[in-house]
Amino acid sequence: MDKQYDIIVIGAGNGGLSAAASACSRGFKTLLIEQHNLPGGFATSFRRGRFEFEPALHELCDVGEPDKREEVGALIDSYGAKVDWVKLPEAYRLIINGEGEERIDAVMPFGKQAFIDKMEEYVPGSRESMEKFFYLADCIMAANAAVAKAGGKADPKVMMKEHPDFLKCANYPTAVVLRKLKICSENAGRSRFARMNLS
Amino acid sequence: MLGERREIPLRADEPVLTAIERAGIAAPSHCRSGECGWCRSRLIRGDVFIPESMDGRRLADDEAGYIHPCSTWALSDLELEIFPE
């Protein structure tokens, strides 16, 4: 070990690993120190008997494809890191134990259109609601991006002009919006007290 | 001491950890049965045998060349990096 470094990083969790890799890739002489005998921090896996437990993320989003990287994928590429990417086969799997019709085992794919199509299979007639839902999700993402770009101080007039549908639902709790879209039942999101129907 | 290199004799019929301790080196260890990972060391060079029942390494350890010397037997000369406390 030398006595002089440009950058010293303490801790080799995800943050430290990223900082050190980033510093290295920019040509800084970097020292990374970790007290444990392996890197990873909270993202360290461990063995118990014949199982290996992975307590970190269950999935990493924003990676993208090799030829079309999203933000996180591009960032990790910029470190020059050699990563063994494992593609998840499905977006969600929901299992609810029950008898007959109460039992649910639903597998939802990635991709907006595929998701909507699959949902229509499981819940015939849901297509219209699902399309509205994803349209609103796109509106929310666009509005969030606009507010972020304006440093958190968006001009209300600009918001009203360019993001009207976002504003229509922005003040309501998610459960209310989902009820309006007929995705949730009348009772969803309501406390037990509210559901007592006191007259 | 960090970066110190030592050459020690190894026997084929005892775990690598035993050889390290026999040479007077205080290598870290805990369960001495392969499971806990306390003795995790980096195998730089050489061939080893690890009984399946004692292989408590993670998938990444195996792929990145790390062994648990307490449950590893040498099949050739080895170059090993240990991480004393």
Image: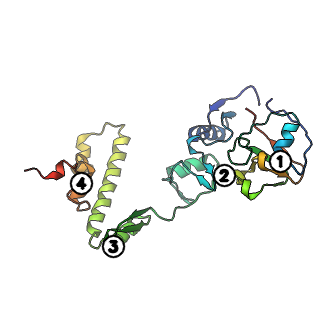
Label 1 residue SS: loop
Please determine whether, in this image, residue A160 is positioned above or below residue B85. below
Q: Which residue was labeled with disc 3?
A: A100
The residue at the point 69 percent across, 44 percent down is B37
Drawn side of residue A52 relative to residue A1, left or right: left
Numbered badge on residue B58: 2
Query: In which chain is the residue bearing label 4?
Result: A
The alpha-carbon separation of the residues under discs 2 and 4 comes to: 45 Å
Please determine if labels 1 and 3 lie on a single subunit: no
SS label for mark 2: loop
Residue A86 is situated, as x and y percent measured from the top left of the image, at 58, 59
Q: Quadrant of the N terminus of chain A?
A: top right
Q: Which mark is residue A177?
A: 4
Secondary element under disc 3, as helix, strand or loop, is helix
Along the line of sight, the residue nearer the viewer: B60 or A113: B60
> Label 3 vs label 4: CA separation?
30 Å
Left or right of residue A6, residue A97 in this image: left
